[in-house]
Image (tube, rainbow, N blue to C red):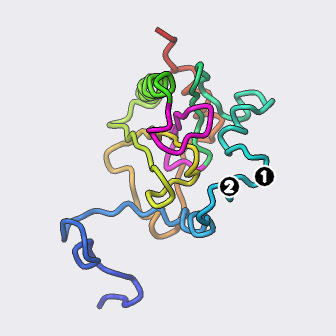
Amino acid sequence: MTDPGAGPASAAEAGGGPGPGLARLWAGWRTAYIERLGDDPAEVRPDGDGRSLFERIFASDLPDDETHVLWRGETCFAVLNAYPYGSGHLLVLPQRAVADLGGLTEAEATELWAGVRAGVAAIEAAYRPDGVNVGINLGAGAGAGVPDHLHVHCLPRWSGDTNFMTAVAEARVLPEPLEVSSRKLRAAWPAPA
């Protein structure tokens, strides 16, 4: 018997998607965060200084090993995700808040994708995963947690790396602390060409 409060059993039942067999990636821990976001991107700027979370991280006087900044370029930088889906989950982003790809300058766009390539190379060298997810959530409707400052997710993946913990316990199993991930990725980051 199906739990009537559980929602549709398939994407087809929900009115979209290819039907039975469609796998879902459930990120239940993000629900409370996303629900408290309003239509105003400034709501994710808790100190009200007009800068995005990422602009504050980049401009921080704290050492990079404390903020988990992995790389600083001329217009972009990379940082560990503070709420990772797995060990080694990093973000590559412009130094200034830009909400969408069309808002990037040519220099930012070029360096952003060079940073993504370097980040993926660092992930592959440090973690030797079976694959790497690379993606951007543009806008709150697409799942962006900081919708006014685009960021590219780079996430190492292994065959069979999802399990019941995320869906049932709303917890992620991270085999290492952020500090260890930060050291590994910084050491594996390719030197500029």
- Looking at the image, tell me whether mark 1 or mark 2 is earlier in sequence order: 2
**Badge number at residue 57:** none
Residue 154: image quadrant is top left
Place of residue 25 in the rendered image (x, y in percent of width and height, measured from the top left): 38, 60
Residue 186 horizontal side relative to residue 164, left or right:
right
Does 85 appear in magenta?
Answer: yes
User: Which residue position is annotated with label 1?
Assistant: 48
Amino acid under label 1? Gly
Place of residue 5 in the rendered image (x, y in percent of width and height, measured from the top left): 41, 88
Place of residue 103 in the rendered image (x, y in percent of width and height, measured from the top left): 50, 37
Do residues under tags 1 and 2 come within 8 Å of each other at their CB atoms? yes
Place of residue 99 in the rendered image (x, y in percent of width and height, measured from the top left): 53, 45
**Badge number at residue 42:** 2
Amino acid under label 2? Ala
Segment tinted magenta in the rendering: 83-104
Query: In terms of depth relative to the viewer, which is nearer, 38 or 116?
Result: 38
The residue lying furthest to the top in this view is 193
Q: Main secondary structure of the magenta part?
A: loop
Classify mark 1: residues with Cα within 10 Å, few (<14), some (14-19) or many (20+): few
Classify mark 2: residues with Cα within 10 Å, few (<14), some (14-19) or many (20+): some
Query: In terms of depth relative to the viewer, which is nearer, 110 or 171?
Result: 110
